[in-house]
């Protein structure tokens, strides 16, 4: 971290911008945390080791594509069913509102 004098001077308000800039420079000059470096190295080595996944054969790829297409078709049918339900609920809500307005008009006309 930045040294204590720089932090205290930045907080005191004397030359705020200059002191804050100096505090920022002090932070940048610090050594990195070795735990973070080790963690990043592990993450990068795992990503490199995994690499792009390749299918063993065209049949395996075709089977995966067929499975994904089946899931996509299922999702599309669920979306269509949800849209139909929402449309029905909209019509029912509209009809209920019309009925309420008509009833209010009838009650007010008495």
Image: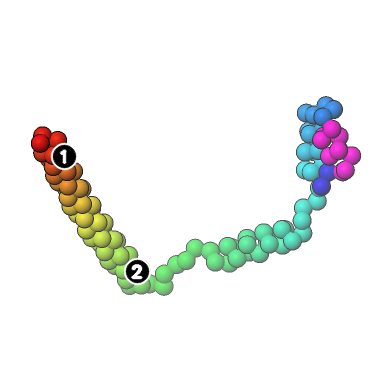
- Residue 5 covered by magenta stretch: yes
- Residue 73 position, x and y percent, is 25, 62
Location of residue 33 with respect to 23 vertically, above or below:
below
Residue 63 in the figure: left or right of residue 83: right
Residue 84 in the figure: left or right of residue 15: left
The residue positioned 74% from the left and 61% from the top of the image is 35
Of helix, strand and loop, which one carries label 2?
helix
Mark closer to the observer (1, 2):
1
- Residue 97 position, x and y percent, is 18, 43
Task: Give the mark nearest the N terminus, 1 or 2.
Answer: 2
Disc 1 marks which residue?
104
What residue span does the magenta drawing correspond to? 3-12
- Viewer-nearest residue: 104 or 34: 104
- Residue 98 covered by magenta stretch: no
Disc 1 + disc 2, Cβ < 8 Å:
no
For the stretch drawn in magenta, the main secondary structure is: helix
Q: In which quarter of the image is the C terminus?
A: top left
Of helix, strand and loop, which one carries label 1?
helix
Task: Check residue 64 in the rendering and tell me which mark sits there, or answer none.
Answer: 2
Residue 26 in the figure: left or right of residue 37: right
Image quarter for residue 3? Answer: top right
């Amino acid at each position: 971290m930045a040294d204590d004098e720089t932090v205290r001077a930045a907080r005191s308000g004397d030359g705020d911008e200059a002191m804050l800039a100096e505090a920022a420079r002090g932070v940048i000059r610090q050594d990195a945390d070795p735990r973070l470096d080790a963690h990043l190295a592990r993450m990068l080595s795992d990503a490199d080791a995994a690499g792009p996944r390749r299918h063993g054969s065209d049949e395996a790829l075709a089977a995966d594509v067929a499975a994904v297409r089946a899931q996509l078709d299922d999702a599309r049918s669920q979306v269509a069913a949800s849209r139909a339900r929402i449309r029905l609920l909209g019509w029912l809500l509209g009809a209920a509102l019309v009925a309420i307005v008509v009833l209010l008009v009838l009650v007010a006309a008495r």
